[in-house]
Amino acid sequence: MTTIDSTLLNHVAIVLMEPKFPENIGAAARVAWNMGISRLIVVGSIPPDRERMAMMATHKAAHLLENMEFHHNLETALAPFSRVVGATARRGRQRIPGKNPRDVVSEILPLLPDNEVAFLFGPEDRGLTNDDLKYCQMTSSILTADFSSLNLAQAVAIHCYELYHGVVHCRKDTAPSPGLATTFELEGMYHYLEETLSSIDFLQDKSYDYYMNNIRQFLGRMQLSSKDSSIIRRICRQFLRLQGQSVAKKE
Amino acid sequence: MTTIDSTLLNHVAIVLMEPKFPENIGAAARVAWNMGISRLIVVGSIPPDRERMAMMATHKAAHLLENMEFHHNLETALAPFSRVVGATARRGRQRIPGKNPRDVVSEILPLLPDNEVAFLFGPEDRGLTNDDLKYCQMTSSILTADFSSLNLAQAVAIHCYELYHGVVHCRKDTAPSPGLATTFELEGMYHYLEETLSSIDFLQDKSYDYYMNNIRQFLGRMQLSSKDSSIIRRICRQFLRLQGQSVAKKE
């Protein structure tokens, strides 16, 4: 028998963005539990119906629903995570090219000992929006025939399966990974960066999203540590302070 | 973009043994279609409710339900297939050791150009029985935490996903595989083998199933061709004929 370092999966959360059918949350909870993942987060306007969730979860996964976190806001939900993988079937021009779940998991596994990782899934009908995806450093696309979209719980199932399979078969001697900046730290950094780039008129109404999305993708790929993000934030703050002084001088 | 030899998946069927909930058939149809598999077979006592199936299938997978084969008997359902993979979570003493779906698929892929392959799934509550599994040359077990059992449609999803992933990434230069004996041919052979072994009192009430299961597993692993199975059948028939004569002589 393979011995499994199942504690690794304690660093993984399944995050469902505005799921429409509570049954799908239940089915996702069940398969997450099947695959050794016990952290489930739902983002929405009203808490989902408990009974309809429980119907699909089986009693063994009931504790996942009891301990389920519920947030009104995606940024708050993702705040503690230093790696966010967005599951997407669609490929827009603004999108980070999606890798397949197997490759995603092989990149994520070395991060698990030192980082909290979220797998983010969009609503059943429309998937994740570009606005949701701005929090993601990676996207994961399950290749399907005719680019058809999967049932939500089955997309969760395939990702959980790849994670569990990866943990079971991963080599113990992989190099430790750095502690990456969390969404909370990254969003703080982006906030200062936006303000700074706006202050020099680099970001203007028309191209605002275009540039910020590209900058997010670029910095997202860089695997910034907490320290890195803090340095960038401090540079921006310092720049803004000086600029404030120079504006004050001019006036 | 990868070009996909999707015709390979025309040789794959998903076979559901006595599913309890028509919704699960619908969900299985949807994910089979998502992964380029269009042959769906259900075995049961009464045809499943069309509306409840359709609810989970989405309209794009509706033709899978329309073309779905329905059989009362598993042996008849499996007759055309020369490789049957049984999906099982349980590990009994009588069971063929289950491989994981990824390894199963890598063994199945080279067979696809020349063989019809069935993936067989048991009912939601109890899975496949030993009696169902006797038609399987391989079993596939999705490893789960605490050996918990997956939702039927999710087990189908993971197998279909592995098949599609395998076909997309498989190398075109794999050696062609032989045409294997179908379930129809194998069952014909086993029938004669049973009769022959009974006639020499090798198979007796107490150990009957034990020996026949082991013989099935042993011959199952051998990847018998149509010709091989025909030869074994003819040897048995010839033996029985001679024995009939010698019995007649003695009388």
Image (cartoon, coloured by chain):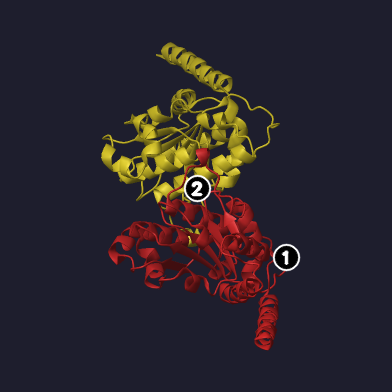
Chain colours: A red, B yellow
Count of numbered labels shown in the rendering: 2
Asked if residue B168 lies left or right of residue B45, the reply is right
Where residue A43 appears, as percent x and y from the top left, is 42, 67
Q: Quadrant of residue A219?
A: bottom right
Residue that badge 1 annotates:
A173
Q: Identify the residue shown where x is 66% and y is 67%.
A: A202
Estimate how packed mark 2 is, as few (under 14), some (14 to 19) or many (20 or more) residues with alpha carbons within 10 Å.
Answer: many
Contact between marks 2 and 1 (CB within 8 A): the answer is no
Residue that badge 2 annotates:
B158
Q: Up-down: is A182 above or below A91?
A: below
The foreground one among B250 and B64 is: B64
- Quadrant in the picture for the C terminus of chain A: bottom right
Amino acid type of the residue tagged 1 in the rendering: Asp
Secondary structure type for disc 1: loop
The foreground one among B188 and A54 is: A54
Q: Identify the residue shown where x is 69% and y is 61%.
A: A171
Q: Is residue B49 visible?
A: no
Residues behind callouts 2 and 1 on a single chain: no
Where residue B177 appears, as percent x and y from the top left, is 64, 28
Residue ranking furthest to the front: A251
Amino acid type of the residue tagged 2 in the rendering: Ile
Distance between the alpha carbons at the discs numbered 2 and 1 = 28 Å
Q: Identify the residue shown where x is 62% and y is 65%.
A: A216
Q: Chain of mark 1?
A: A
Estimate how packed mark 1 is, as few (under 14), some (14 to 19) or many (20 or more) residues with alpha carbons within 10 Å.
Answer: few
Where residue B130 appears, as percent x and y from the top left, is 42, 42
Q: Up-down: is A174 above or below B224?
A: below
Asked if residue B7 lies left or right of residue B48, the reply is right
Q: Up-down: is B83 above or below B58?
A: above
